[in-house]
Amino acid sequence: MKLAPHLHRLGNDVVACYLIDTAEGITLIDAGLPGHWRDLQRELQVLGKSAADIRGLVLTHGDSDHIGFAERLRSEHGVPVFVHAADAVRTRTGEKPKTALGPMRLGPTLGFFGYSLRKNGLRTRYVSEVTEIGDGDVLDLPGKPVIVGLPGHSPGSVAVHVSLADAVFVGDALTTRHVLTGRKGPQPAPFTDAPAEALSSLDRLAGLSASWVLPGHGAPWRTSPAQVSEEVRKG
């Protein structure tokens, strides 16, 4: 789905990932669930493009619902996968600490896990080879993505700022629809390793210039990054 010039979303408010379309090629931000491969193919077809036009996939972190088709894209099409060094092991193996679930409601929780099953969420392939990146890196990819470290949800959680798309992609640093409660609006995301650190990290977004703040779960958010920290704390 096209959100704005250069900017497309794959998936929905339950699980989403993003595509940046430029004259130099395509950059993907996150890879959703394995079944989002079909969503990717449909969006590429609409654009008159193919996987050969994808220059790189940037992960906001290494959790299974963000790496879904990453290994397929890497192994079948040679697309490099970029992830913060602190999440490299998580991306390659799935190793992560257990976290408290927090508040839940039966309907939204079943909806989340049901959607994950329909999108082959139990068949995640971890990524055999990754390119490690760090805070402040400017990647040589279409749109020139800038990496902003946001540790907390995971040690290597990052935001990806793409000025061309007027957007900052925040992964699970926040959510605009809680997958376990169904509550809408900007708020802390569940399954977070270090909740206090995650909230503190949001202050690092304040200096970025963008009109879109795009989470991995929930509706796209039209706001200034300068407002993010305050609004999430209210949530």
Image (cartoon, rainbow, N blue to C red):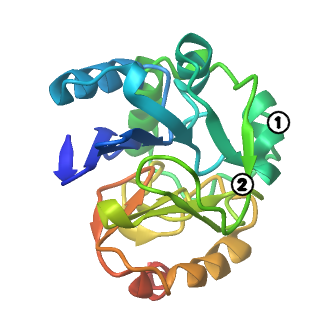
Q: Where is residue 70 drawn, in percent x and y?
A: 57, 27
* Along the viewing direction, whichever of 114 and 47 lies nearer the viewer: 47
Q: Earlier in the sequence, mark 1 or mark 2?
A: 1
User: Is 163 above or below relative to 125?
Assistant: below
Element on which disc 1 rests: loop
Location of residue 2 by image quarter:
top left
Location of residue 42 by image quarter:
top left
Residue identified by numbered label 2: 100
Say if residue 15 shows up in the picture: no
Q: Quadrant of the C terminus?
A: bottom left
Q: Is residue 157 left or right of residue 145?
A: right
At label 1, counting other C-alpha atoms closer than 10 Å, the crowd grade (few under 14, some 14-19, many 20 or more) is few
Q: Residue at x 19, y 30 (%)?
A: 47
The kind of residue on which mark 2 rests is Ala
Q: Residue at x 59, y 61 (%)?
A: 138
Element on which disc 2 rests: loop
User: Is 135 above or below relative to 230?
Assistant: above
At label 2, counting other C-alpha atoms closer than 10 Å, the crowd grade (few under 14, some 14-19, many 20 or more) is few
- Dot 1 and dot 2 residues touching (CB under 8 Å): no
Q: Residue furthest top?
A: 76
Q: Residue at x 48, y 49 (%)?
A: 180
Q: Is residue 123 left or right of residue 5?
A: right
Q: Where is residue 127 drawn, in percent x and y?
A: 70, 26
Q: Is residue 48 left or right of residue 144?
A: left
Q: Residue at x 19, y 24 (%)?
A: 48
Residue identified by numbered label 1: 95
